[in-house]
Amino acid sequence: MYNHQKDRNYATSTEIDQFNLGFRNIILKEFRISFNYNSFDGAFYGSRTLNKYKFNKTYYMSNSFYGLLSQANLYGNMYTRQLKDIEKSYLTALSLTKNELEN
């Protein structure tokens, strides 16, 4: 049960990571976004502040952008489902452990 979920998590995370690399590059390019970055602020990776941008309405209304957002939404839904499945497995294991300890 857990090995399957571990493998599923690895596969999903890898696919999302690969998608995200391209997604960020396209968004930064199409909307000409630049940030100021403070690597010492924030808990893990620092913080960034929007420095400047140029909104590209043509791209915003395009099928390409819509497709990217649809794919990002799909990944969000997949990962949410996966987390729910993992939670269910842990709750099952907890219940079985409690049952074992009581008997």
Image (tube, helix red, strand yellow):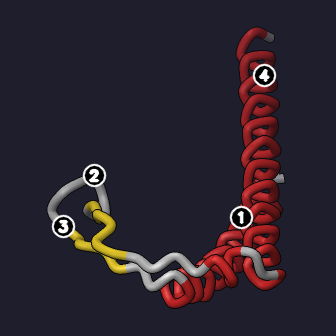
Label 1: few (<14), some (14–19) or many (≥20) C-alpha neighbours in 10 Å: some
The quadrant in which residue 10 appears is: bottom right
x 81%, y 49%: residue: 81
For the residues labelled 3 and 1, the Cα–Cα distance comes to 31 Å
Q: Amino acid at mark 2?
A: Ala
Task: From the image, state whether disc 3 or disc 2 is nearer to you.
Answer: 3
Direction from residue 53 to residue 67 in the image, left or right: right
Element carrying mark 4: helix
- Whichever of callouts 3 and 1 sits on the residue coming sooner in the sequence is 1
| Residue under pointer 2 | 43
For the residues labelled 1 and 4, the Cα–Cα distance comes to 23 Å
- Whichever of callouts 1 and 2 sits on the residue coming sooner in the sequence is 1
* Residue 101 place in picture, x, y as percent: 71, 16
Element carrying mark 1: helix
x 78%, y 20%: residue: 100
| Residue under pointer 4 | 95
Label 2: few (<14), some (14–19) or many (≥20) C-alpha neighbours in 10 Å: few
Q: Amino acid at mark 3?
A: Asn
Depicted 96 relative to depicted 9: above or below? above
The quadrant in which residue 102 appears is: top right
Compare residues 26 and 62 and report the one nearer the observer: 62
